[in-house]
Image (cartoon, grey):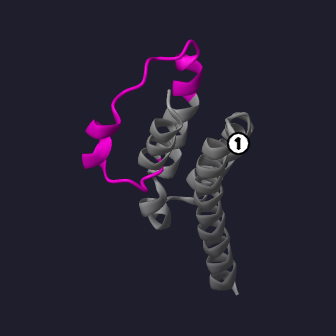
Amino acid sequence: MSRTRAIAQVLLASGLVFPCFARAIGKPPAPQSETAQESWHKEFDELCSRTQDAMTLSEEQLAGLIRRCDAIAPQIDKLDASRRKVYGGRLRMCRGLYAYVLDSKKNSTTNARK
């Protein structure tokens, strides 16, 4: 895979490139460890897709999402440098949002009791 194609795919996966450019990138040949890569990537997509609904989630759901973010972080740390930087940064932002909302909800319930 060419370096340009690899960078374009990382940008597409991170949402920094519009999907209409996906056809120009093309699909690379499937690597040997595609199932291992797919498992963390599916989990990553599922975790980061819930950020828009973060305020509607319960404290238990938020805590579960934070634990799941922590669980896939080591897998992302094993990626090559450019993908690790993109996916790791995005995962940290998703986890940070969930932690902020969880903390906010805990503080609001504590203040309501007073």
Q: Residue furthest bottom?
A: 114
Asked where in the image residue 16 lies, by quadrant, the reply is bottom left
x then y, percent, for residue 11: 46, 49
Which residue shows up at 70% across the image and 42% down it? Answer: 73
User: For the point 66% across and 57% down, which residue is it?
Assistant: 92
Q: Amino acid at mark 1?
A: Ala
Task: Examine the image and state in which quarter residue 37 appears.
Answer: top right
Q: What is the secondary structure assignment of the residue under circle 1?
A: helix
Q: Residue 14 vs residue 67: left or right?
A: left
The number of numbered badges drawn on the structure is 1
- Left/right placement of residue 114 relative to residue 38 reads right
Q: Is residue 48 above or below residue 42?
A: below
Residue 74: % across, % down:
75, 37
Q: Which residues are magenta?
A: 14-39
Quadrant where the C terminus is found in the figure: bottom right
User: Residue 93, position in %: x, y?
Assistant: 61, 61
| Residue that mark 1 sits on | 73
Q: Where residue 101 appears, x then y in whole percent? A: 59, 69
- Determine whether 106 is above or below 37 in the image: below
Closest to the observer, 25 or 56: 25
Question: Does residue 16 lie above or below 112 as drawn?
Answer: above
